[in-house]
Image (spheres, grey):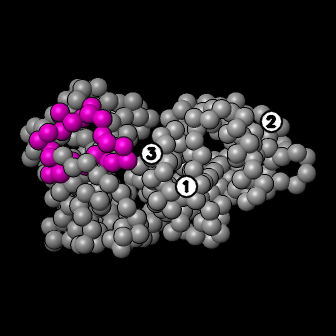
Amino acid sequence: MKAAVVFEKGSIPRYADFPEPEKTHENEVWVSVKAASIKNLDKARANGSHYSTENEEHKPKVIGSDGVGYLENGTKVYFFSKNGTVAEKALANPQMMVTVPESLDFSIAAALPNAVMGSAMGLKFKAGIHPGAIVLINGATGITGRIAVQIARLYGARKVIVTGRNEESLQALLKLGADEAISLQMDDENFKEKIQYIHNETPIDIVLDYIWGHSVEVILSALKGDGTFSHKTKLISVGGMSGDTIQLSSQILRGTDIQISGSGLGSWTREESKLLFSEVIPEMFQAAADGKIKIETKDVDIRDVESVWNTEIPNGKRLVIRI
């Protein structure tokens, strides 16, 4: 079969012939793949830098962690797999597979689930979002942040505040459902005062963070209590684009009713992972089919995977390989 293959660790994937995968479990089913998105996860797994590849043997492999295609009976499905998906054929575990509405474009169906994992899972299971919640999304101008704004609204958030550096992208988020945009370009004092003002007026229930680093330090200092009763806030870390560590004052933890946790591969319970495929992704597929969630894609034929691998994709779009 034809596939996008990494032959050496750190090399760029090439369009090449590759053996069809062999079944390792009786319940695996064949998928004729039509589209697969390329994400930071896929690039990190391809070059061997992602923590999920630490114990993997270094050998030629098909790239990709999920895809959309047809089962042998003609059912249109999305599936997740660590065994490579950017290929003409792939094997899928039915427990990690979701039926896709026929009206939903292959590229949208391929691009949406990873952003859903990086937003809905944190909002629903880690933050316990409820109707009327006040949500701050830190570093919201990326693809997953854009989806998070829309999903927070679907889950009933009363107010959604977003932060980011790109002014054009921040303004676009206001059109997607955000109520207020705060630039990370402003100095620390003004940024802190802005967060404090919002928190005093409409106490923030959830901080969904995609960048970590210094901005989170400032946000935490803005939420810090003064020795009286404080509002319960949950800070959920999803990414670390601005750095992997922060300085955290113990006074913030002692003087503030704040809970800090993370949402990502390995942080979800077995039951939550099952619900991702049985409830969360199907719900978001239907929302996208109904026009309630929007995501933009940059579609490229699999033959051109090598030339596009290191190309900068237009802001707010997900790269999708069409097969």
Q: Find residue 319 and report its horizontal and vertical position in percent.
A: 28, 46
Labels 1 and 3: the sequence-earlier one: 1
Q: In front here: 273 or 23?
A: 273
Q: Is residue 147 above or below residue 262?
A: below
Find residue 203 and report its image quarter.
bottom right
Choose between 206 and 68: the one closer to the eye.
Answer: 206
Q: Which residue is mark 1?
A: 122
Mark in front: 1 vs 3: 3
Question: Is residue 212 part of the magenta span, yes or no?
Answer: no
The image shows residue 53 at horizontal and vertical percentages of 38, 35
> Looking at this rendering, what residue extends furthest in the right direction?
228
- Residue, x 71% and y 50% (percent of image)? 259
- Which numbered circle lies on residue 168? 3
Q: Which residues are magenta?
A: 301-323
Q: Separation of disc 1 and disc 2 at Cα? A: 24 Å
Read off the residue under disc 2.
Answer: 250
In the figure, 246 relative to 322: above or below? above
Q: Amino acid at mark 3?
A: Glu
3 or 2: tag closer to the N-terminus: 3
Q: Position of residue 276 (x, y in %)?
A: 45, 62
